[in-house]
Amino acid sequence: MRRAVALAMIGFFLFFSYPILSWYGPYIGFGSGSDATHCLVLGDVDKDGLVDIVAGNYGTQNFVYYGNGDGTFTSSHAFGTGTDLTQEVILCDVNGDSWLDIVVGNNQQQNYIYLNDLDGTFDTTAYPFGTGSDNTYAIACGLVNGDGWVDLVLGNLGQQNYVYLSDGTGNPFDTIVPIAFGQGEPFYSRTWDVVLGDMNNDGDLDVVVANHQQYNFIYLGDGTGSFATGYGFGSQEEFTHSLAVEFINSDSFLDVVEGNYDGQNRVYLGDGTGNVGTSFNFGPVDDRTQIVTLTDIDGDTHLDVLVGNGGDTPFQNRVYIGVGDGTFSASYNVGSPDTTWDAAFGEFNGDGLIDIAVANEGQNKIFLNSETTMDNLASLFDINTFFVAGDAAYCTDVLGSSKIAFGLGRGGASQNPEGRTDLILTQTEHDAGNLIIVGGPAVNPLATEFDSIFGITYTFVENVSFEIQCEGYTIFLDIANDYPQEDICIVYIGEHNGRNIMLVWGYGWFGTYAGSAYIGEISNWAVEQGFHMLMIRWNDLNMDGLIQSGEITVQDRN
């Protein structure tokens, strides 16, 4: 493929700052929901100004999904045989007509180029290339020999890797003998990714190769299409499935991000010779990384990395925030664990924020970048806002609502939210209003409703334990030994159908009130800048049965 913090005193919080993060979710699905999508690529194939998605499926029909400009992709166009074992798709203009064409790499089958019919469809012309039985896992395109025609670099698993030079006419790759590179027989490279970049600043493109249980390599280009001199990096024990090549630190040399399956991911800093030197690890040691891809999500000029994990088993996808020196600091989860094969950054709904497309075994997903975060509470719930308590709510849920209302007023909200129970909330208010839902599923049906929308779940063992799960995070309460001197709560902010929703609920009323008290204190909003989900624990340190600010900790945030 391509490419618990326990802070006790509220006053103490003000001395901390967190990077401005983005929030992705809940997802918008695209595809059938049961696809085996192993690769995707983004581009405007129909020239309507909107981003489209080309999805390559393993053993089923490949599709182009056309963007609607609002984050959805509804209409589609099929291409290929319908039974291709597709491992790679890229977009590039192979024939110089200014329209993006599709290049497909298949596993032990014929590889194909599908020419754009000058309208965003791909029905008329398909050109085969390769041997007809290549194990093609990676393709990169670029001008590798300086003749102005786009060339292809293919990475094959357990076979020879090749450069295909374009002749500029008809099937552009049918006349020039392919140029082999990398390891030859009998020890062929087990290549999963290839990326082009000028690693030694000589003006010629070089190729960076990710291998499976072999050293990864940088092969230097000579400007003719040949790649000879090679530098190995990484470990022979690593299963490197993805690479990203960009300027990550402050020098002028390209750097490499290495994504490893069942191993730790790593950044290698380029030294200007074509080789890499200093390296930094990031993420857990057992990620199942299939894809790493880079962009500046938060606008601080430092590149951030999306790590797509899974492939054959559900695993958590994550974004790591770049510091600018080759290291990554804060991180947060994207969605819930998925069987992800590929992912890409794009801008899908016209708001100027960086969104994410994810290719999965099963449901493919779009995650829109949202500004519904804790530091924006006053603007999110400025007008047309309703507090909603359950008809069977505790009085403390109403008191907690008043704590939040007081905070909104101090924070600048122009209208005081009205109060409702779930039974007297009108359908119009339910469907169009900004809702602040206080109290959990046991006493508030709206908590149950929006928990399911945002993917919040819980596990309850009567008189034993209670656990809340959300976006790969969990918070656990030992009821038998710790309650009621301890309680837990989730505070969650999300957007649904054009309005904003906040959920505040705990196992018991202690937890719910603690969450309300914490989020109702506006000094905490800056502390939680960029976050949309908090998992909160209250511990009655002085055993007085009351909830004080110094007894509230944020165990996890996302």
Image (tube, helix red, strand yellow):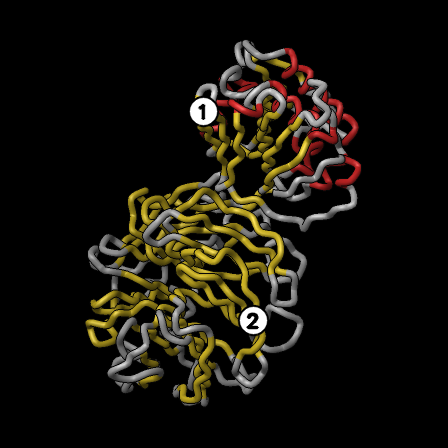
- Give residue 279's quadrant in the image: bottom right
Q: Can residue 348 be seen in this view?
A: yes
In the rendered view, would you say 83 is above or below 115?
above
In the rendered view, would you say 106 is above or below 476?
below
**Which residue matches tag 2?**
279
Per the model, the C-alpha gap separating discs 2 and 1 is 44 Å
- Residue count near mark 2 (Cα–Cα under 10 Å), binned few <14, some 14–19, many ≥20: some
Q: At which x and y percent is residue 214?
A: 37, 74
Q: At which x and y percent is residue 336?
A: 45, 42
Residue drawn 45% across the image and 24% down it: 460
Q: At which x and y percent is residue 192?
A: 35, 68
Residue drawn 34% across the image and 73% down it: 155
- Give residue 495's quadrant in the image: top right
Q: What element carries label 2?
A: strand
Q: Which amino acid does label 1 sit on?
A: Phe
**Which residue matches tag 1?**
460
Q: Is residue 549 left or right of residue 206?
A: right
Q: Nearer the viewer, residue 45 or 335?
A: 335
Q: Is residue 319 left or right of residue 189?
A: right
Q: Which of 31 and 438 is in front in this view?
A: 438
Q: Quadrant of the C terminus?
A: top right
Q: Is mark 1 on a helix, strand or loop?
A: strand
In the rendered view, would you say 492 is above or below 166?
above
